[in-house]
């Protein structure tokens, strides 16, 4: 009987809410050998519910196969890990009974560890296998004769973020479905320049919140003209920060649309670094800056980690895809959230955001097809 085990768990929903499943396994911490695994479709649920169900399954496996062992739980859900560790409050009513069930199952001394998604691949593969079994059954049903009365076809889902779906490896399948349902198109506009932008200062949520200068307003006007030439958009949403709202208002005035605010599109919080340039931060916080650049879970002092921004960006994406399925929406945001949305479309690790240069006033276009396949149409284009 192993003395130390690791639970690797994950959950996912294709639609959020939509068809959902979880995957969990228990691994001997000393040898790496998988002791037990479990995966199951759970009907229609949200990503968070599925993630909690994966955790519960993993804890149940420990009771069955390694009772008395020391336990470390590894998940790529920052929400579940932080809530179970007691650092974040559980506010959503759907989460409370699941969290209580997990707490009852968890032995004393559990170590709660957040890991990047690429380090949770085994659990992710289990849940995708469970989901794909259901998808294969749905495809088989659609191949029957139209008058076959046995089972109704499963409806298509607009968003599928899980990395191992075969459709993500072949976006031609998404193009095939365009005749049935057009993709949901997100035009991401970075706000125009401010005095802080020109001085290359850290400027995030909770900081000075500057507005556009004359050059920034001109950039917003050029973006508005570009969007009008392409035929406009169905809706406009914006980060709540002033420079983004002012940019969105310029476009909205041209297109005669209202602007909705999406809190999760706000820039990262840089804490003590806000208002300082890179050189000053490097001088005063060299170790913290190095950690922030290397580790997605390392936040600036008093600020927000890249992992936390990644979670917010994913939440914003889910909101937009659910609210504007098959339509085109302009989302006005900032460097970090836009980079996070691009890396989600490319299924890339969080650290790739350091390599994405998003110019002020530039436009990036992403599309999500009805079968869940994403596509990057353009990146950081500065309209003339």
Image (cartoon, grey):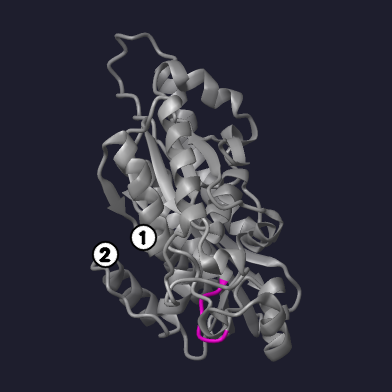
Precedes in sequence: disc 1 or disc 2: 1
Q: Is residue 146 above or below residue 240?
A: above
Position of residue 293 measured from the top left corner of the image (x, y, whole percent): 70, 72
Element class at badge 2: loop
**Residue 123: quarter of image:** bottom right
365 or 108, which lies in front?
365
Position of residue 233 measured from the top left corner of the image (x, y, whole percent): 36, 33
Query: Which residue lies at the image location 56% right of the left edge and 45% below the top edge?
Result: 362
Query: Which residue lies at the image location 48% right of the left edge and 36% below the top edge?
Result: 368
356 or 154, which lies in front?
356
141 or 159, which lies in front?
159
Element class at badge 1: helix
18 or 103, which lies in front?
18
The residue range painted magenta reads 301-305
**Residue 97: quarter of image:** bottom left
Name the residue beneath numbered marker 2.
94
Outermost residue, right side? 31
Query: Which residue lies at the image location 59% right of the left edge and 46% below the top edge?
Result: 163
Name the residue beneath numbered marker 1.
49
Q: Answer yes or no: do the residues labelled 1 and 2 have beta carbons within 8 Å?
A: yes
Q: Is residue 189 above or below residue 54?
A: above
Query: Which residue lies at the image location 59% right of the left edge and 41% below the top edge?
Result: 382
Q: Residues within 10 Å of mark 2 (few under 14, many from 20)?
A: few
Q: Magenta includes 303? A: yes
Q: Residues within 10 Å of mark 1 (few under 14, many from 20)?
A: many
**Residue 329: quarter of image:** top left
Position of residue 156 measured from the top left corner of the image (x, y, whole percent): 38, 30
Q: Is residue 67 above or below residue 172?
A: below
Position of residue 213 measured from the top left corner of the image (x, y, whole percent): 47, 59
Name the quarter where the C terminus is drawn: top right
Name the quarter where the N terminus is drawn: bottom right
């Amino acid at each position: 009987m192993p003395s130390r085990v690791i639970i690797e768990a994950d959950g996912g929903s294709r639609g959020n809410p939509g068809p959902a499943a979880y995957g969990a396994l228990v691994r001997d911490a000393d040898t790496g050998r998988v002791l037990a695994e479990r995966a199951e479709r759970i009907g229609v649920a949200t990503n968070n519910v599925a993630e909690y169900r994966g955790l519960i399954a993993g804890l149940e496996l420990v009771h069955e196969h390694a009772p008395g062992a020391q336990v470390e739980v590894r998940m790529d859900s920052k929400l579940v890990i932080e809530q179970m560790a007691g650092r974040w409050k559980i506010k959503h009513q759907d989460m409370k009974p699941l969290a209580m069930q997990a707490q009852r199952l968890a032995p004393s001394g559990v170590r709660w560890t957040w890991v990047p998604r690429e380090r949770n691949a085994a659990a992710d593969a289990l849940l995708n296998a469970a989901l794909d079994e259901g998808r294969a059954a749905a495809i088989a049903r659609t191949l029957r004769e139209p008058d076959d009365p046995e089972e109704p076809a499963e409806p298509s889902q607009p968003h599928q973020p899980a990395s191992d779906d075969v459709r993500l490896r072949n976006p031609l399948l998404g193009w095939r479905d365009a005749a049935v349902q057009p993709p949901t198109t997100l035009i991401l506009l970075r706000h125009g320049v401010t005095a802080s932008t020109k001085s290359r200062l850290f400027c995030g949520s909770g900081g000075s919140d500057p507005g556009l200068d004359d050059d920034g307003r001109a950039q917003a006007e050029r973006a508005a003209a570009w969007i009008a030439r392409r035929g406009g958009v169905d809706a406009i949403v914006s980060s709540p920060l002033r420079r983004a709202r002012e940019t969105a208002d310029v476009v909205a005035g041209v297109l005669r649309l209202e602007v909705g605010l999406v809190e999760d599109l706000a820039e990262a919080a840089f804490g003590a670094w806000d208002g300082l340039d890179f050189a000053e931060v490097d001088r005063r916080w060299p170790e913290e800056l190095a950690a922030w650049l290397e580790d997605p879970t390392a936040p600036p002092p008093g600020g927000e980690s890249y992992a936390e921004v990644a979670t917010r960006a994913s939440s914003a994406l889910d909101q937009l895809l659910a609210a504007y399925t098959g339509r085109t929406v302009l989302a006005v945001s900032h460097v970090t959230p836009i980079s996070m949305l691009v890396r989600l479309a490319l299924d890339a690790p969080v650290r790739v955001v350091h390599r994405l240069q998003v110019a002020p006033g530039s436009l990036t276009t992403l599309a999500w097809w009805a079968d869940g396949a994403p596509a990057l149409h353009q990146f950081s284009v500065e309209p003339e």
